[in-house]
C-alpha cells in the first residue's frame, strides 16, 4: 500500500508546483489546494499505514490487546484539512477581489509592488 | 497550575472575541483593545518574573501529561518574546486610535489585531510541534485579513505574494512535521529531542532539518526566500506594517532558534554551517536592496531582511556568546523597527506621502520628530551608545571569537551600509527643503492636534526603551545570557517538560 501512496503524494506535489508556476492566478490557488492535500497524504503515509482495531483499551486493562491503529495522524490531518479549508476560502475571496481591482488574472502583470 | 503561561494566549483571544461582540461600536472596540493590550503586557511581565524564579514554566493542557497532551512551555526566550509582544501590542493599540481609519475599524481591525497577537503569543509558548503549526496558521489568517484592509491596488498585489509564499511555507512545515512524526512517533518537542538522538537514519533527519529550515526561513524572510517581504509589507495600513515588521518575521526567527537548539543540534557542522551562509546572504541582500529604494517603508522593509541576518548569525555560530547576541539583537530590533515604521506613519500623516523625493523639511518644522527618528535610526545602524551598538558588538565579537572571518566582515560592512540608508532617509525626508508640489499645510500649523499626540506617545516610549537598553544594558544582557544558557543546554528544557511523566 505504501508505495502506491508514496507515488500519489509525489504526483500531487509535482502537480501542485506545476500549477503554482503558471501565470493564471486561479491556477495558483488550485496549486495551493493540491499542495495542502499532498502534505496531508504525506502525513498519513509516513505515519505508517496499519490495518488495526480502534485504539480502545478494555475495561480493567492497562494496554489494548492486539494491533491497534495510530489515531494521531488522523487527528493531525483533520486539523490540517480544516485549517487548509479556511485559508483556501480566504484565498478564493482574495483572488476574486484582486481580479475586480486589478482587472487581470495574470501574475506577470502584478509587478507594481516588486522592486 | 501555572496560569501565567496560558494567559498571554487567552487574553488577546478574549479581547478579540469581545471586540466582535461590540461590532457596531467603534468606541467600545477602541477601549477594549487598549485595555486588552495593557492586560497582555501585565501578564507578560508576570510570566517573565516567574521564569526568572523557576527557569522553565510548564503547563500541561487539560492535565494530560507530556508527551501525550499539548504542553505550553515558557523558557527565558519565550518569556522575552512574549514581553516584547505585549509592549508592541500596547504601542500599536494606542497608535491605532489615531491612525486607523473608520472604515478599517468597521471591517474588524481590532478583532483581527488581537487574533494576530494570540497567534504570535501561542507560537512563542507552545511546546508541541504540531500546535506550533496551528498557531502559525492562526497568525497567518489574521495577518492576511489585516494586510488587505482597505482593498487598494498595491495591497491586492502585495497580498497575493504574501499569501502564496506563506501558504507554501506552511505546506513545507506540515510535510516536515509529518515526516518527523513518521521517524520518531511523537509531537512533543522535548520528546522529539530525546528520541531523535536514537534515530540511526541520520540522512533522513538531515532532510527533515532542511525542510524546517526552508519553512521557517520563508517565514523569517531569510535569504534566498525573502522577496515576498519587501513586496508586501509596505502596502498595508501603517500600524499593521509596524506590527508585522516588529513581530511576524521574528516568529520565524524564534522558531528557528527553538528548533535548531532543541531538536536538530546533533549535526551542527551541517545545519549550522548552512545557517551561517544563509545569514551572510540575508544581511547582504537586504541592505543592498534597501540602497536602491526611494520609498520610506520599502527601505525599512529591506532593512528587516538584513537585520534578520544578524539574528541568524547569532544562531549559526552556536556559541554561548553568539546566542546571547542573537537574543539581544531580537529584543533591540523589534523595538527599533516598530518605532521606525510608526515614525514613517507620522511623516505620512503630515505630508501625505511615503516617497522620499516628495518628503522634506521635517527638521525645520518638527525638530522633536527628527530627534525621535534619529534615535532608532542610529540605533539600527549601530551607533554607540544606543541599543543597536551593543547588539551588533556582541554578535560580531562572537564571530571573531569563532574565527568566522568572512561572515564577520560582511556583518561589519552591512552596518556601514545600514548607516548609509538611514542617512539617506534623514537627508531626504528631514534635512532638505520641502519640494515644490508637496502640500505642507499641515506642517505649518503651529499646534499639534490631539490625535497626533496619540501617534507620538508610543514613538516616545519606544525611543525611551532604545535609550534605556543602550545606557543601562546590563539587566538586558543578563536576560539574554540567562536565555542563552538555557538554549545551549536543552536537557533543562527536556527535564522541565518530561519530568512530570509518571
Image (spheres, helix red, strand yellow):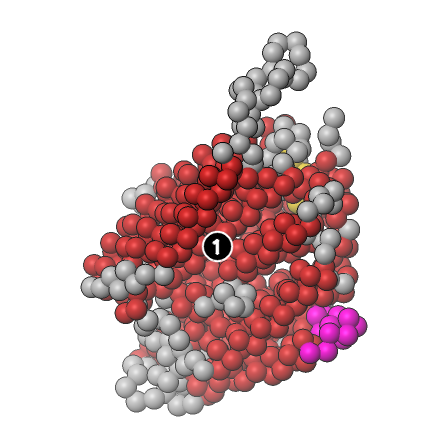
Residue at the location (48% across, 85% down)? B424
Q: Which x, y percent locates residue B70?
A: 60, 35
Callout 1: chain? B
Residue at the location (73% across, 30% down)? B501
Q: Quadrant of the N terminus of chain B?
A: top right
Q: Which residue is mark 1?
A: B169
Secondary structure of the residue carrying tag 1 is helix
The part of the chain drawn in magenta is B394-406
Residue at the location (28% across, 50% down)? A93
Quarter of the figure with residue B234: bottom left
User: Taken as a whole, is the magenta stretch helix, strand or loop?
Assistant: helix
| Label 1 CA crowd tier, 10 Å (few <14, some 14–19, many 20+) | many
Quarter of the figure with residue A104: bottom left
Q: Image check: B90 left or right of B2?
A: left
Q: Is residue A41 magenta?
A: no
Quarter of the figure with residue A60: top right
Q: Which x, y percent locates residue B2?
A: 66, 36
Amino acid at each position: 500500500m505504501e508505495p502506491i501512496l508514496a507515488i500519489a503524494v509525489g504526483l500531487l506535489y509535482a502537480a501542485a508546483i506545476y500549477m503554482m508556476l503558471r501565470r493564471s492566478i486561479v491556477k495558483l490557488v488550485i496549486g495551493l489546494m493540491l499542495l495542502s492535500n499532498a502534505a496531508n497524504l504525506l502525513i498519513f503515509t509516513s505515519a505508517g499505514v496499519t490495518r488495526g482495531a480502534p485504539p480502545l483499551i478494555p475495561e480493567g486493562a492497562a494496554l489494548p490487546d492486539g494491533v491497534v491503529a495510530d489515531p494521531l495522524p488522523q487527528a493531525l490531518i483533520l486539523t490540517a484539512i480544516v485549517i487548509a479549508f479556511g485559508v483556501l476560502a480566504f484565498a478564493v475571496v482574495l483572488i476574486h477581489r484582486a481580479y475586480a481591482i486589478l482587472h487581470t488574472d495574470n501574475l506577470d502583470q502584478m509587478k507594481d509592488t516588486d522592486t | 497550575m501555572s496560569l501565567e503561561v496560558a494567559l498571554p494566549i487567552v487574553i488577546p483571544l478574549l479581547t478579540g472575541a469581545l471586540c466582535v461582540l461590540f461590532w457596531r461600536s467603534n468606541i467600545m472596540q477602541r477601549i477594549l483593545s487598549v485595555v486588552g493590550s495593557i492586560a497582555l503586557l501585565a501578564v507578560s511581565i508576570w510570566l517573565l518574573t516567574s521564569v526568572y524564579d523557576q527557569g522553565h514554566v510548564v503547563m500541561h493542557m487539560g492535565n494530560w501529561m507530556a508527551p501525550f497532551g499539548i504542553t505550553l512551555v515558557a523558557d527565558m526566550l519565550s518569556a522575552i518574546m512574549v514581553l516584547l509582544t505585549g509592549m508592541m501590542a500596547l504601542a500599536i493599540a494606542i497608535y491605532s486610535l489615531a491612525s486607523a481609519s473608520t472604515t478599517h475599524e468597521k471591517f474588524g481591525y481590532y478583532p483581527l489585531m488581537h487574533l494576530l497577537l494570540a497567534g504570535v503569543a501561542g507560537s512563542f509558548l507552545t511546546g508541541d510541534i504540531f500546535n506550533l503549526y496551528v498557531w502559525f496558521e492562526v497568525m497567518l489568517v489574521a495577518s492576511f485579513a489585516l494586510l488587505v484592509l482597505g482593498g487598494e491596488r498595491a495591497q491586492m498585489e502585495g497580498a497575493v505574494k504574501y499569501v502564496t509564499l506563506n501558504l507554501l511555507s506552511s505546506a513545507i512545515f506540515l510535510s516536515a512535521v509529518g515526516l518527523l512524526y513518521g521517524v520518531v512517533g511523537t509531537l512533543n518537542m522535548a520528546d522529539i529531542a530525546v528520541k531523535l538522538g536514537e534515530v540511526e537514519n541520520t540522512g533522513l533527519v538531515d532532510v527533515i532539518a532542511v525542510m524546517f529550515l526552508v519553512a521557517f526561513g520563508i517565514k523569517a524572510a531569510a535569504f534566498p526566500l525573502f522577496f515576498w517581504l519587501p513586496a508586501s509589507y509596505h502596502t498595508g495600513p501603517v500600524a499593521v506594517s509596524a506590527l508585522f515588521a516588529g513581530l511576524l518575521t521574528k516568529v520565524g526567527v524564534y522558531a528557528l532558534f527553538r528548533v535548531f537548539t532543541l531538536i536538530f543540534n546533533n549535526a551542527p557542522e551541517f545545519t549550522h554551517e548552512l545557517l551561517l551562509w544563509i545569514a551572510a546572504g540575508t544581511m547582504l541582500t537586504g541592505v543592498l536592496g534597501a540602497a536602491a529604494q526611494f520609498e520610506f517603508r520599502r527601505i525599512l522593509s529591506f532593512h528587516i531582511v538584513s537585520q534578520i541576518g544578524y539574528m541568524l548569525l547569532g544562531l549559526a555560530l552556536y556559541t554561548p556568546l553568539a546566542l546571547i547576541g542573537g537574543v539581544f539583537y531580537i529584543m533591540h530590533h523589534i523595538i527599533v523597527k516598530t518605532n521606525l515604521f510608526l515614525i514613517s506613519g507620522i511623516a505620512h500623516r503630515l505630508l501625505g506621502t511615503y516617497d522620499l523625493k516628495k518628503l522634506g523639511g521635517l527638521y525645520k518644522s518638527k525638530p522633536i520628530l527628527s530627534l525621535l527618528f534619529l534615535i532608532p535610526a542610529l540605533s539600527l545602524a549601530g551607533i554607540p551608545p544606543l541599543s543597536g551598538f551593543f547588539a551588533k558588538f556582541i554578535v560580531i565579537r562572537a564571530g571573531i571569537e569563532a574565527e568566522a572571518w568572512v561572515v564577520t566582515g560582511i556583518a561589519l560592512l552591512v552596518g556601514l551600509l545600514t548607516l548609509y540608508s538611514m542617512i539617506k532617509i534623514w537627508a531626504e525626508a528631514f534635512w532638505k527643503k520641502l519640494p515644490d508640489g508637496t502640500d505642507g499645510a499641515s506642517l505649518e500649523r503651529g499646534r499639534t492636534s490631539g490625535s497626533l499626540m496619540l501617534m507620538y506617545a508610543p514613538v516616545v516610549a519606544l525611543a525611551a526603551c532604545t535609550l534605556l537598553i543602550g545606557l543601562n544594558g546590563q539587566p538586558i544582557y543578563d536576560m539574554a545570557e540567562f536565555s542563552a544558557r538555557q538554549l545551549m543546554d536543552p536537557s533543562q528544557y527536556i527535564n522541565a517538560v518530561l519530568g512530570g511523566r509518571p
